[in-house]
Amino acid sequence: MTSGDFLTQDMGFDEPNYPTVLGIQLTPMVSGILLGLLGAAIAGATWVYLISPLMEENGTIQADVDSKEEQLKKAEQIKRDLKAAKEELVKVGKQREQVMSLFAKERDLSTLLLDLNQLIERNNSGVLASKQSKLAACPSWVREQYTKVAKSQTFEDQVGPLVAEAKLNKFQPAGVTEVITAAGSDSYVQPALLGKLKRQTIDVSFQGNFNQTQSIFRTIERLQPLLIIKNLSMTLGTKAQKSGGLYETGPGETIRFLTNCQPETLVTTTFKMDALMPASADVVAPPGAPASPSPAASPSPSPKP
């Protein structure tokens, strides 16, 4: 007996009774499709209503964090820039103080005559010894001229000084201090400084030999006030030295040039000296107004006897 004996045409299986919803029979395939669609719908709804808003909120928060971090970086950069600016301001302030210290002050002008006269006199420290040494090489009739002060002065007026003595001949402030408002002939004043500086012009004249003249100018450069030299003029010798020097008549009416006993050539130097100062709030006298006495105004030193 086989299984075929039991299976007859009348004996068969009935189709399953699947539920029907809205006219659709929920077969396994249909149920699977519906479940898939339902899962996709739930996933889409979850994305739209939950995940997407969270991601947008997260993006907004992240953008806000990035913005705050950028602001923080900018704030730190601003702090660094501010610190650097303060340091630069201090540096510029110190430089300005150094530059302003180069300019003259009113009290400097009051002592400028004394300072200039002293630095000129320093060049005369070895004059006496040099004169004695030179006289030793001169004939007796020349040495005899220096036995008395008045006699030696008369002799040097005639032939010139045997040893030059540095001497300040003139120190005369010209009027009052004035604010420099136009460059004009003052090419040393830059346009940016016009109206910010004032000057006191002083007429100066001194004499000495070549070495003394060079030494005096070097010392003027080292004076504390900022001084501008202009209209420089130098004259060699004196009227007495135009004769050509000292000679004497030797045996047989021969004329001998006194090589080691010649007066030194005097250099007379004249110039105008501008003392520059920062312009202050004091009122500058208008053109035509009577000049007030300057603190640096002092009578010119008289020649030594």
Image (cartoon, helix red, strand yellow):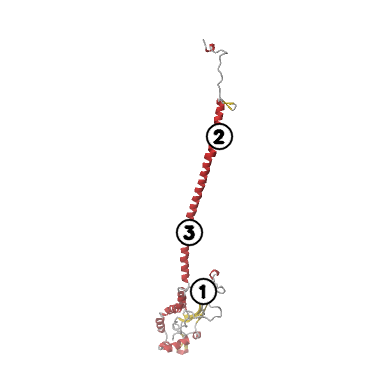
Please tell me the numbered disc located at residue 82.
3
Badge 3 amino acid: Leu
Q: Residues within 10 Å of mark 3 (few under 14, many from 20)?
A: few
Closest to the observer: 68 or 263? 68
Q: Residue furthest top?
A: 1
Could you give the CA–CA distance between mark 3 and mark 2, rounded to whole angstroms? Answer: 59 Å
Q: Is mark 3 on a helix, strand or loop?
A: helix
Tell which residue pokes out farthest to the front in this image: 22
Q: Position of residue 44 (x, y in %)?
A: 55, 36
**Residue 254 drawn at (x, y percent):** 47, 88
Q: Earlier in the sequence, mark 3 or mark 2?
A: 2
Query: Is residue 70 depicted above or below 277 in this figure?
Result: above
Residue at (53, 38) in percent of width and height:
47
In space, the residues marked 3 and 1 are separated at their CA atoms by 35 Å
Mark 2: secondary structure: helix
Percent x, y of residue 152: 43, 87
Which amino acid, mark 1?
A: Lys
**Residue 255 seen in render:** no
Q: Mark 2 points at which residue?
A: 41
Classify mark 1: residues with Cα within 10 Å, few (<14), some (14-19) or many (20+). many
The residue drawn where x is 55% and y is 32% is 38
Q: Name the residue under label 1.
A: 198
Mark in front: 1 vs 2? 2
The answer to whether 285 appears left or right of 150 in the picture is: right
- Mark 3 or mark 1, earlier in chain: 3
Residue ID at (55%, 28%): 32
What is the distance, in whole Å, between disc 1 and disc 2 at their CAs?
91 Å
Relative to 82, residue 197 above or below: below
Give above or below for 183 relative to 155: above
